[in-house]
Structures are given as C-alpha cells and as structure tokens.
Image (cartoon, helix red, strand yellow):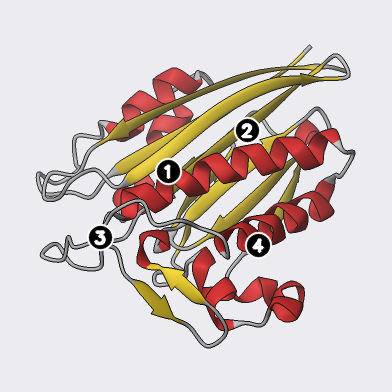
C-alpha cells in the first residue's frame, strides 16, 4: 500500500497585536517516497503592552530549525520516537548559539544557561512518511487526528525553558518536562493537523469543519481560520492540515 499526501496551511493575524505566529510547510523525496513536514510556532509577548522584543523572530527561527533538523535526521535513517528526540535535542543545542535579531531583545539568565527572550515561543511540528507521523509539541495549542480535536493546555511551557533551566547532560532525562513526542501509524490516519492556541474554546466548531471537509486540507484550513464564532479581538490563528490518501 502507498500513500498520497497533500498539505496546506492558513494564517489569520491577531486583531490586537502584531502577527507573532510563524509556520513552514515542506515536502521532499527520500528513496522515491514523499515525506511531509509541517511546523508552527506562536511567539509569546506575555503582555499586549510589552513590545520591547520581537517573539515572532524566535518563532520564525524555531520553525526553520525544526524543518532543517527533521529532514537531516530523517535522511540519516532515524525514525519513530528516536527521530522526535533527536530533533528536540538538536534544537535545544542550537539555542545555545542563538543570535538575537532585534536590538532591544534582552538576554536573561536561567538556572543553567542564558536565553534570548525572542525564543519565548511554542513549537508544534510533525514529519510524516508512509509508515508513521511523528508529532512534537511544546506549549499550548491543538492537534487534530482524523475527526478528533485535542487541545493541549500547556500554557507557559516553551522549548527554551528546558535549555535554560537544565544542564545539557540532563536534557534527555528532562525532555518530558517541556516536550511531548507522539507517534501516529499512517494506516490509521485520514487527516491530521496542528494549530496555534488562537482557536481556544472552538473545539466544537473545529470538529464540524473537520467532518464537513471531505478531507480537503485547503478547505479545512480555510474554514477553521475563518470560523464565524471567532471573536473580533483574537490572537493569531495558524492551521496546518495534512490529508492522507491510500493508493
């Protein structure tokens, strides 16, 4: 059995602050098979009045680092949970050498390492092949498995916290404090998605969009980001959907 993948995403900017979400979609071929990567990050300002730093810069860096690292380790033959763990550890290691991109951004001291406040951002990303989809989450947000909507209420948890507050030789042991790595067998999936926390309290409306979409990722992404019940004052909303067609 083989699979066709289709991936699509939409983003709707917040109405009360500058856009701070970032996302990236990527397809590549490996040994004649199509591999899909989808990743998003929600840069968190902490306060609508506190804009001395630019969390969207850290979010953009995180999605780029995820995609680059996921492809690298996949091409090296790493799979399943080990792939998720290697991606996370590589991103944490890269954070140690992060260069601030905005002049006013501050460096703060964690228990073990310094960190740039631009890195105060969530991370939701997956890499999918014909066997499995590996999902990595850190922070609050959503993932969608077929018609099921799962909100992860990990508000205040971010990838940088593990890097900043644990010694490097403890990262692997402490991984679960800031990250969740989940594995989904591809033969059980029809549609899969991730979304930022701007859709909080919209579970019922999201489920309706999933059920009425005919597994069209473009239609689902558009409908979810344009749910009529979304309030006028809302956070950034980013949705990435992957459809899985068995051939």
Q: Provide the secondary structure element on which disc 1 rests.
A: helix
- Give the mark toward the camera: 4 or 1: 4
Quick one: 39 or 73, which is closer to the camera? 73
- The reply, left or right, for residue 213 in relation to residue 35 is left
Compute the Cα span from label 2 to label 4: 21 Å
Q: Taking 188 as reference, is 90 above or below it? A: below
Residue 138 point in image, percent of width and height: 53, 61
Dot 4 corresponds to which residue? 93
Dot 2 corresponds to which residue? 37
Dot 3 corresponds to which residue? 53
Quick one: 98 or 65, which is closer to the camera? 98
Dot 1 corresponds to which residue? 60
- Give the mark toward the camera: 3 or 2: 3
Compute the Cα span from label 2 to label 1: 15 Å
Question: Going from the N terminus, do you reach mark 4 or mark 3 first?
Answer: 3
> Are circles 4 and 3 on residues that touch, CB within 8 Å?
no
Q: Taking 214 as reference, is 147 above or below it? A: below
- The reply, left or right, for residue 230 in relation to residue 88 is left
Residue 135 point in image, percent of width and height: 65, 48
Question: Going from the N terminus, do you reach mark 3 or mark 1 first?
Answer: 3
> Are circles 2 and 4 on residues that touch, CB within 8 Å?
no
Q: Taking 228 as reference, is 49 above or below it? A: below
- The reply, left or right, for residue 102 in relation to residue 188 is left
Residue shown at 47% from the left, 46% from the top: 61
Residue 115 point in image, percent of width and height: 46, 71
């Amino acid at each position: 059995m083989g699979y066709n993948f289709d991936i699509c995403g939409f983003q709707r900017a917040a109405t009360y602050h500058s856009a701070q979400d970032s996302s990236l979609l990527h397809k590549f071929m490996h040994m004649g098979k199509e591999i899909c990567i989808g990743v998003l990050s929600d840069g968190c300002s902490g306060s609508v009045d506190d804009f001395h730093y630019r969390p969207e810069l850290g979010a953009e860096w995180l999605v780029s680092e995820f995609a680059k690292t996921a492809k690298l380790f996949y091409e090296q033959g790493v799979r399943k949970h080990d792939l998720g763990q290697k991606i996370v550890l590589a991103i944490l290691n890269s954070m140690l050498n992060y260069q601030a991109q905005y002049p006013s951004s501050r460096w703060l001291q964690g228990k073990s390492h310094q960190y740039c406040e631009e890195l105060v951002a969530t991370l939701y990303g997956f890499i999918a092949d014909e066997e499995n989809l590996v999902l990595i989450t850190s922070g609050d947000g959503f993932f969608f498995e077929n018609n099921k909507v799962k909100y992860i209420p990990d508000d205040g948890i971010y990838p940088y916290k593990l890097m900043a507050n644990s010694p490097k030789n403890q990262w692997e042991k402490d991984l679960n404090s800031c990250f969740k790595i989940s594995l989904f067998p591809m033969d059980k999936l029809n549609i899969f998605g991730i979304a930022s926390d701007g859709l909080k309290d919209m579970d019922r409306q999201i489920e309706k969009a999933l059920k009425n979409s005919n597994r069209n990722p473009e239609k689902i992404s558009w409908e979810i980001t344009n749910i009529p019940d979304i309030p006028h004052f809302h956070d950034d909303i980013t949705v990435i959907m992957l459809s899985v067609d068995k051939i």
